[in-house]
Image: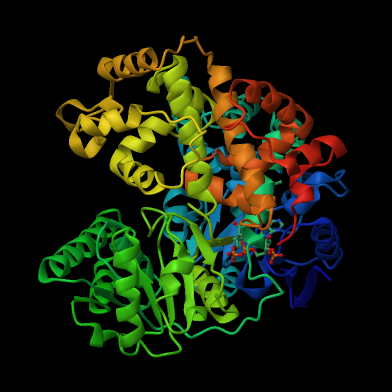
Amino acid sequence: MSVTTRREENTGYVEIDNPPVNAVDTSVRRGLLDAVRWAEAERLERVIVSGKGGMFAAGADAREFDGEPIEPHLPDVLNAIENSIVPWVAAIQGVALGGGAEIALACRMRIMASSARIGFPEVTLGVIPGAGGTQRLPRLVGLATALDIITSGKPLSASTALDTGLVHAVDDEPTDAAFMIKSEELGCVVPVRDLPAPVIDQATIATVRERVRTKSPGQVAPLRAIDVIETGLNLAFIESLVVERQAFMELRTSDQAKALRHVFFTERGAKLPVSIASDTVSLAHVAVVGGGTMGSGIAYALLNASLQVTVLEHDAAGVERARKNVASIIAASLARGLIDEPAAAERRARFIATTDYSRVADATLAIEAAFESLAVKRDVFAELENALPKEAILSSNTSYLDLNEIASVVADPSRVVGLHFFAPAHIMKLLEIVRGEHTSDTALATGFLLAKQLRKVPVVVGVCDGFVGNRILARYREAADTVLMDGSTPWEIDEAMVEFGYAMGPYAAQDLSGLDIAHANRRRQDATRDPKRRYIPIADRMIELGKLGRKSGAGWYRYPGGGGRVDDPIVADLALEEAHFAGIERVDYTADEIRERLLLAMINEATFILQEGVAKSASDIDLVTVLGYGFPRWRGGLMHYADTLGAPWIVKQLERLAVEDPVAWTISPLLQRCAETGSSITESFAQR
Ligand code: 3HC
């Protein structure tokens, strides 16, 4: 039974019971409709609807969106609740999201526990509220607030929901509070559908539309939500629901909604593979080596997860820097209202920075985030081996270096695993867990446990230069530099990728992270680089000119006065000059050609990564590219996107490019096989 009913005197208690999140599927819709009829037949005085397991309802069951809609449809069920002669009251605990929030809006009153959240995250799944949300919410909270809630998809806390008028009261026993409402009071509350529609303020709508275009470029659903709200508010309520439903049904099966569902469910599926034993060390005290930008971000992420953290540095200046870095992240979190002062104080109390390795004698995990040098890392691991208990897990945050070589300095290399965080480490959701040649199941499972505690999405990767993400990034940059050399500018390339959906292009991104990191990598790779591979020297010239990115005031762009970026003609000249030296006749690339080259380069590299077993599934690559590298989420990740192009088309284009440069555009045999068999890349590499 997905919905249970019980009568106590004149009150009916209706409970949604569909674990784990009370998603509103066909059985819940049927159960709620039956409950409406039951309450009327029983001539109840009120119905209190809640969710079992401390969770009201997480919204429509998104797994049903691929199939044909099945009756009863949610809008009809909610109309039945709202029109019933028995008034319903929503008692909200946990979350009321999407269709769950819409159930609450169809009720006469809403009481919410203080820790609960309510919201309309539909746009994050590529759809809009499809059961009255776009029409009831503005009637309840006003046009501007409703536009904000629906287009952002962000849930509201109980106190904010109360302030906006979305709920009537906040009470930690919402069911009891709903019971205590006086019948006369309940009888006087006007159903939301009968509240006057707010006046349509064109200026507000235009502002929100502009904000959405800037914040969510390329995304269809938030703009469609605005259209539906605007159109619907000009119509009779019942007609507005028809407009809403039509838009919802169209979007449900759109490419963007499919892509966003794919990422949503893939994120949730990122769990420890069943083939791996799940024993872990228990985590209480974690050592972090290095308190630079990365190490302090990792330290703060650990503090947020209630762990005790010791940052190890090699001298007093390093200790001071680590303290300052962590203190400034705590201060920034305080300033943004993410934590309050007691929470900040509690985090400070769990943190120390020291040069004394004996302070981590009881730590069960170490995360090395020292300078990216094999020699430095090997020294650190030798010290960690002496300092930590012998069963402790030793991990490295290296972005490129060979984990097996780092591990070989430790007597038992099975204790060593890679934990590759992304900057800022306390914010970015991705964690690449690198499995070395000898990494034990316990070390791997501990990586997954840590990811869970930090609320990050774990992806297991194998050892290779750059693992999954940075290896694809290196190929992306190589393709971009080649286009730059042969006929473009950094700003044209960046613009082409922003039009595709990236928040910023490869050159603006590199200016942020600094050109020196990629430079150090190129020097490291000098000895092993294929001499037949074309080398583009423009980035090296940038280093010679001291153009290291934002931190030096100029990189691929200039940042006059430390402000916004400005195109730099010197950089364009540099590309022309290098092309001239190399005897290249430059061509004029269109934005489409630029995009095609950069995306095909990444797709081809990713397929090699799959072929080599460095990534276990195409979906893992989707997670890495979306969560770590800014690939547009609404395109579903690199491999999901590749499947929308189709392997036969991809191979045809790669063959064309291989005529130009057969080394850089060597086609992955597995991609060729997908093209020959007409199979999808995602399905061909679905193993987890
Ligand atoms: N549909 C189907 N399955 C869902 C779901 C949904 N809306 N929401 C969560 N689940 C599943 C997850 O896939 C996961 O399944 P698994 O155990 O098999 O991996 C399980 O429920 C638990 O989910 P989480 O791991 O995410 O659990 P958390 O406790 O971390 O988070 C949550 C719970 C906050 C509810 C989070 O799952 C969430 O944000 N869910 C999506 C909410 C949403 O987007 N709702 C809108 C749906 S569209 C809609 O309602 C249209 C309507 O207007 C008509």
The answer, for residue 99, to whether it is visible in the render is no
Q: Measuring 49% from the left and 62% from the top, which residue is drawn there? A: 169
Q: Measuring 66% from the left and 67% from the top, which residue is drawn there? A: 50
Coordinates of residue 475 in the picture (x, y in percent): 51, 38
Left or right of 114: which side holds 516? left
Q: Is residue 564 above or below residue 322?
A: above
Left or right of 613: which side holds 537? left
Give the quadrant of ligand 1: bottom right
Q: Is residue 569 above or below residue 384?
A: above
Q: Measuring 76% from the left and 34% from the top, which residue is drawn there? A: 647
Coordinates of residue 264 in the picture (x, y in percent): 64, 52
| Quadrant where the N terminus is found in the figure | bottom right
Q: Of residues 248 and 385, which is closer to you in this image?
A: 385
Coordinates of residue 207 in the picture (x, y in percent): 43, 25
Q: In the rendered image, which quarter is residue 328 located in?
A: bottom left
Q: Measuring 45% from the left and 48% from the top, which residue is drawn there? A: 164
Q: Is residue 324 above or below residue 257?
A: below
Q: In the rendered image, which quarter is residue 177 located in?
A: bottom right
| Quadrant where the C terminus is found in the figure | bottom right
Please count the marks in the image.
0
Q: Of residues 351 and 35, which is closer to you in this image?
A: 351
